[in-house]
Amino acid sequence: MADVLAAEDLAARRGGRVVFAGLSLRAAPGEALLLLGPNGAGKSTLLRVLAGLLRPAAGSLAWSGEEVALDAAAHGARTRYLGHQDAIKPSLTPREDLGFWARLRGGDPEAALASMGLSGLGGLPCRTLSAGQRRRLALARLTLGGAPLWLLDEPTLGLDTASVVRLGALLAAHRARGGIVLAATHLPLPLPGAREVAMGRAA
Amino acid sequence: MIAVFLRELRLALRHPAEALAAVLFFVIVCALFPFGVGPSPDALARLAPGALVTAALLAALLPLDRLFAAEAEDGSLDLLLTTGLPPAGLAAAKAAAHWAVTGLPLLLATPVAAALLALPVEGWGVAVLTLALASAVLSLLGTLGAALTLGARRGGVLLPLLVLPLAVPVVIFAAGAIEAAAGGGEARPFLLLLGAFLAGALPLAPLAAGAALREG
């Protein structure tokens, strides 16, 4: 199967400083890529570029041969991005939170809750959730709408062992459907057969 | 877009203190004028139109600096911008929600504020209508300002400096409309001009705000 996501010679700048340059990567359906590298190597920046949140300073980014920047809305629809922050409003409940994102993204909020074992917490305000539970809620959003490209920034931060196993099942099901996973991490991730992408030295 | 608007309303209902703060600010500022100017109804009524409009615009400005900053801080803005929702649509939903949450309560409080300023009763109806238009224009301009100052240090200071000069024509025509109505004159031309400002800001402000969010 042909590569779907193809980045050629990407470079990114933050605050005038070049974070990385000359980076190329490709991913085919079902593949997982692990971004490895020291702090400041540009892993999170690369994920933001791939998500379309940051314009690359140079290079091209294509999906199925089409330049991503030409149709930002289509790229948004096929991408699920998980950042460092969980994007949770303390006064909403997990059910309301997922309900909101399901209205934008499609999908079933109850199934998403269940996918990360949050069904029992669905009615509590998010301010009462622990850091790990909040992370699980952020991960549950990924499943809404069945997008093919998942961009994960330290997805297992704060998760307990049982939740890492659940995440592993989610990732495996996503890849079995032909989805692509790109994850930046310092911790071992449940991604069997993932290719590793080494990112540059810290400046 | 409707989903974003409804979420804003729900969040505002969970934190009613924020919307209430703007209303109380509006009423208290209007209540201060009789102390400063003296209780003579004639002097107050002369000041009333301008004071009413200025106080309402300042009150509506209060919650603006959190409009996008809160979303940016908890990471929601990144997710919203990756949904494929056009940034201008996001800005329009935010502006509409700001008006519904801050502007509408101000309208409800307008008769109280007008009474404090001894505005003749004939002018109250037009005052509510005028402030409805003026606050809608400010919600749009303010959304633009909030998007532009997002990420800037001291954005909360920069925002009024950016937005209030743009609101000068709104103050002039809004005060003109209320004054005309209170004095038994014709408020219609002023209201039409305010409507024209609203019609201009309605498409332009969200587009510009969306561009600012995209670059941010």
Image (spheres, grey):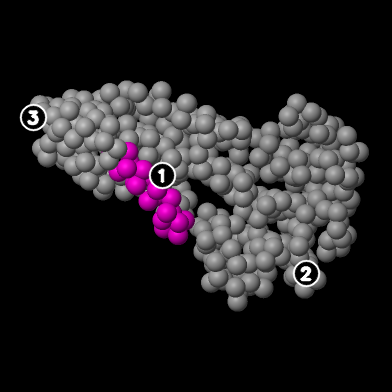
Q: Which residue is mark 1?
A: B98
Same chain for labels 1 and 3? Say yes or no.
yes
Q: Amino acid at mark 1?
A: His
Question: Residue B146 in the image: x percent, y percent?
Answer: 50, 35
Residue A169 visible to an observer of this rendering: no
Q: Classify residue B37 as left or right of residue A201.
A: left
From the image, give the main secondary structure of the stretch colored magenta. helix
| Residue A160 badge | 2
Q: Amino acid at mark 2?
A: Asp
For image coordinates 88% across by 45% down, the residue present is: A38
Q: Is residue B154 above or below residue A29?
A: above
* Residue B179 quadrant: top left
Range of magenta residues: B10-30
Task: Identify the subunit bearing mark 2.
Answer: A
Q: How many marks?
A: 3
Task: Depth check: give the residue in front, A180 or B145.
Answer: B145
Residues at circles 2 and 1 in contact by the CB criterion of under 8 Å: no
For image coordinates 63% across by 49% down, the residue present is: B75
| Residue A196 badge | none
Task: Depth check: give the residue in front, A72 or B129.
Answer: B129
Question: Of all residues shown, which one is farthest toward the bottom?
Answer: A120
